[in-house]
Amino acid sequence: MKEIHYSDKEILVFKDVDGIADYAVRKWTEIAGKTVNKKGSFSVALSGGKTPATLFHKLAKENKLPWNRTHVFMVDERFVPYHDENNNYRMINEILMRHVDIPAKNIHPILTTVETPQASALKYERELNSFFSTRSGFDLMLLGIGDDGHTASLFPGTPSLKEKKHLAIAALPSGTIMSYRITMTFPIINNAENIMFMAAGNDKAPVIREVIEKEKSRLPAAMVRPGKCSPIFLLDKAAASLLSKKP
Ligand code: 6PG
């Protein structure tokens, strides 16, 4: 692993996604241990997509983690049935959740069985507000970055980027993606205690350069500016290949 220093971000470059996942397991373990000791529970929000799958497979074997004190939420969800191959929670449940000893009440999927995406977003926001009525913000949030610079389901140039009040909204992505998404918004993302981005592959290199190096980038991933931490970027060599600073 090699580190690249930027003022407000921690950039760690790994040989491949396996190296990213090994580091993320260690960081998750460190944060979960400290947080449970301090607060008695650990809250984490997980993104979907392909990149985190390796991490989820590794976490499924980490039976010494405090799963009974861990609360797992979803950063976003596609408004498709659970059994749809595009459902994020289905992927995370099959790879991770069903293999660890976490109480069912501690798993907080975004429901897609309700009649509309808007109803689902409202329901999820109520669940977030109730959970955070006695807590200050997510202890850890895992975010991905699309090759268009989106993160969560906050897509470039969409009204979702301007949401300042609601913690979860129904969003219709831009471009070719037509199915509704339910997504957390910047108010809750930027309130997290720890944020780890994970990105791998050459196709991410141009947006990684912009998000990390362009001062006033309007890409959604660049708008993640948490008040309580500097986001950590876990990148493979390909995704980091266009950065002007070399590890
Ligand atoms: C989703 C994710 C999304 C993802 C990025 C990167 O629902 O698709 O939440 O924000 O993190 O699209 O996805 P990959 O890891 O597959 O490149």
Image: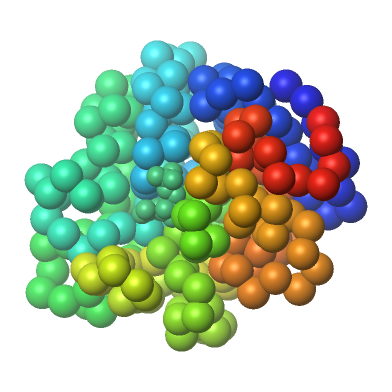
The vertical placement of 78 against 33, above or below, is below
Query: Compared to 157, does 183 lie above or below?
Result: above
**Residue for point 50% across, 62% down:** 148
Indicate the quadrant containing the N terminus: top left, top right, bottom left or bottom right.
top right
Residue 132 image point, x, y percent:
51, 61
Q: Nearer the viewer, residue 245 or 94?
A: 245
Q: How is the image coloured?
A: rainbow
Residue 110 in view, yes or no: yes
Image quadrant in which you'd find residue 214: bottom right
Q: Is residue 166 visible?
A: no
Quadrant (top left, top right, bottom left, bottom right) of the C terminus: top right
> Which residue sits at x=31%, y=76%?
172
Q: Is residue 193 left or right of residue 141?
A: right
Q: Nearer the viewer, residue 135 or 178?
A: 178
Residue 133 drawn above or below residue 34: below
Residue drawn at x 23%, y 31% is: 94
Seen from the viewer's position, the closer of residues 206 and 179 is: 206
- Is 215 displayed left or right of 49 in the figure? right
Indicate the position of residue 104 as horizontal and vertical percent values. Answer: 26, 39
- The answer to whether 82 appears left or right of 176 in the picture is left
Say which residue appears at 27% left-offset and 46% top-offset: 89
Count all numbered tags in the image, as a single digit: 0
Q: Is residue 173 above or below residue 247?
A: below
Residue 158 picture location, percent across and down: 45, 81
Q: Nearer the viewer, residue 114 or 236?
A: 236
